[in-house]
Amino acid sequence: MFLTGAFPAISVATYCLLGVALTLCFIFYFRRPGKLPPGPWRLPLLGNAHQLPSKTPWTVFGQWAKTYGNIIHVDLFGQSIILVNSQKIAFDLMDKRSTNYSDRPIIPIAAMSQVGDTFALQSYNDSWRRQRKMIAQEFTAAGVSRFQSLQEREWRLQVKRILHNPDTIFSEIKLRAGVIAIRALYGYYVRTPNDPMLSNPIEVIREFSRLSTPQTGLAFRFLPRWTPGVTFFKEALDYERLHVAATVAPYEWCKTNLETPKVLVPNVCCDIWEKNSVLDQDGHKQVYNALSSALGGGLDSNASSALTFFMTMILHPEVQQKAQMELDTIIGFDRLPDINDQSRLPYVRAVLAETLRFMPPIPLCIPHALKEDDIYEGYFLPKGAWVIPNIWNMLRDPIVYSDPMTFNPDRYKGDDKAMEQVKNLVFGFGRRGCPGRLFAENSLFVLIATTLATCNISPGLDENGKQVLPNGNYTSGTISFPEPFKITINPRSTNTDALLAEVHELYE
Ligand code: HEM
Ligand SMILES: *[C@@H]1O[C@H](CO)[C@@H](O)[C@H](O)[C@H]1NC(C)=O
Ligand SMILES: *[C@@H]1O[C@H](CO)[C@@H](O)[C@H](O)[C@H]1NC(C)=O
Ligand SMILES: *[C@@H]1O[C@H](CO)[C@@H](O)[C@H](O)[C@H]1NC(C)=O
Ligand SMILES: *[C@@H]1O[C@H](CO)[C@@H](O)[C@H](O)[C@H]1NC(C)=O
């Protein structure tokens, strides 16, 4: 009361502004230990929080690069974040200086639940090293070849199902990706989408994707857990229960049924046990946490690339025809393509690479973190800073990829080195790079080749029977996938039925 009486409202506002200005000066001139990379103007306390886009942030960060350059500093509630928009800087930092750049930020949802004990999200330490080694050893070129027939059969089954019932395509894709991952990792064969062994981990990934965006967690890290109106903490508790149920269940199932034929072999879980014959309680925890990271990866980014493939095939019938011509010529009509045909099918390989380039499933990678202070091109990069590589932007660099917004497998001109360059970005960087890469590539290849060999893909129809094209928009979480779209699937040749008739569901 007396304040408003003593000072006109306008001067109160002025004092406030002055306060803000002083705080800004303080932050900029006293707290800054060196010249940070450029970035958008920051507010005190909030930093750049108000500017961080919630919708497809990779496109906005790409825009920022035009103003601030390819290395940008933003501040989120006091947390330094380095955005890397170019391939060169990403490799300079995360590959060449990988000792310093292989840490992960402790994201709040991980710190608050056991998901923080799985190596994908762990600090760069001995626990990470141990788990990572377990998984990396299983997913070498030789290691993934033992799962080829599984991947081939499941993607053939997918085609068989969707030709019978095109409406199920999206649920069927998710189911098959899950069947493959859980069979390969734990020896368990999922039969229906409602099997909790599959539906629980899918729910976990969806929740994780939602609760792990930088905005969600960092905003709440200074608040007490009882803050009114903040549901994050309760959600984190629910998440913890779900996570434990989803990751312990398949592990315990495998352990319990180990000596029975229920456990299908080979599988990663049993192979890790064999290599580590004596496991104490902590050892078992390390194994199941290692498998939980692999399950997260294997559930495949919501089969994002599979969806992108179907979407782009609707939009580019000319690409479909060209790939089908290659398949008809090289494979013929007497058999279905398999993973070993990869070397004979350069155009299908290009479709795969272009699918990954067009929309990398994890467009902003999983953030790395800096272990030590570092200097790069004169800029000071503080210890503990998050390093976020904008993979999406790197794959749309017009200097490397002319007309980058267009889906065009011909851009590689059959050059596998150019395709490799795409994959070297899509699967991440340095010592943190995706250990499941070869497995994922095989799966995607056989999905694409089998589908194109047997199906014609065209736009779906609306209620009035009119064709509707996909809108091309993508969702915004850590894992991005196309918004729902309509699709029509038709069998290609009379022989398709005969070839697919021989493919059967596997029941033990
Ligand atoms: C198209 C499919 C996939 C894509 C696009 C993909 C992409 C990625 C990316 C971008 C990262 C982060 C790398 C970094 O931090 O620099 C990553 C990490 C990881 N991926 Fe994948 N991934 C895929 C499939 C898989 C599969 C099938 C597995 C199963 C083994 C897997 C397991 C992992 C694990 C465990 C990590 C964490 C590695 C670590 O932190 O050390 N991913 N993946
Ligand atoms: C590794 O880091 C994680 C945090 O990400 C921590 O929980 C764990 O105890 C550390 N393990 C070792 C062996 O240092
Ligand atoms: C996967 O995609 C479906 C729609 O196809 C969506 O409802 C779901 O939220 C997605 N899951 C994740 C983990 O993003
Ligand atoms: C981390 O970076 C700093 C600064 O460039 C360097 O002095 C240090 O040797 C690096 N540490 C490691 C382990 O590479
Ligand atoms: C795609 O997203 C943009 C931006 O969010 C929106 O303006 C547009 O309407 C969306 N397109 C369609 C067809 O939904």
Image: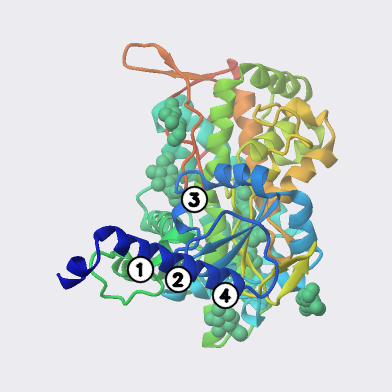
Question: Which residue position holds label 3?
Answer: 178
Query: Mark 4 or 2 closer to N-term?
Result: 2
- The residue that disc 4 covers is 287
Q: Where is residue 251 in the image (x, y as percent from the top left)?
A: 48, 70
Which residue is painted at 52% across and 75% down in the image? Answer: 117
CB atoms at circles 4 and 3 under 8 Å apart? no
Q: Earlier in the sequence, mark 2 or mark 1?
A: 2
For the point 75% across and 50% down, the residue is: 87
* Image location (x, y in percent) of residue 246: 41, 64
The answer to whether the residues at label 2 and label 1 have Cβ atoms under 8 Å apart is yes
Q: Is residue 361 visible?
A: yes
Q: Which of 407 and 20 is in front in this view?
A: 20
Sequence-wise, the earlier of marks 2 and 3 is: 2
Which corner quadrant of the image does residue 75 belong to? bottom right
Of marks 4 and 2, the one in the foreground = 2
* Mark 1: secondary structure: helix
Q: How far apart are marks 1 and 3 (CA)?
A: 24 Å
Give the mark nearer the N terminus: 4 vs 3.
3
Disc 3 is placed on an element classified as helix
Residue at x 48%, y 19% (from the top left corner) = 459
> From mark 4 to mark 1, how far is it between C-alphas?
24 Å
In the foreground, 484 or 249 = 484
Per the image, label 2 sits on a secondary structure element best described as helix
Mark number displayed over residue 236? 1
Q: Looking at the picture, how far across and down is residue 222, in whole percent?
A: 39, 75
Type of amino acid under label 2:
Pro
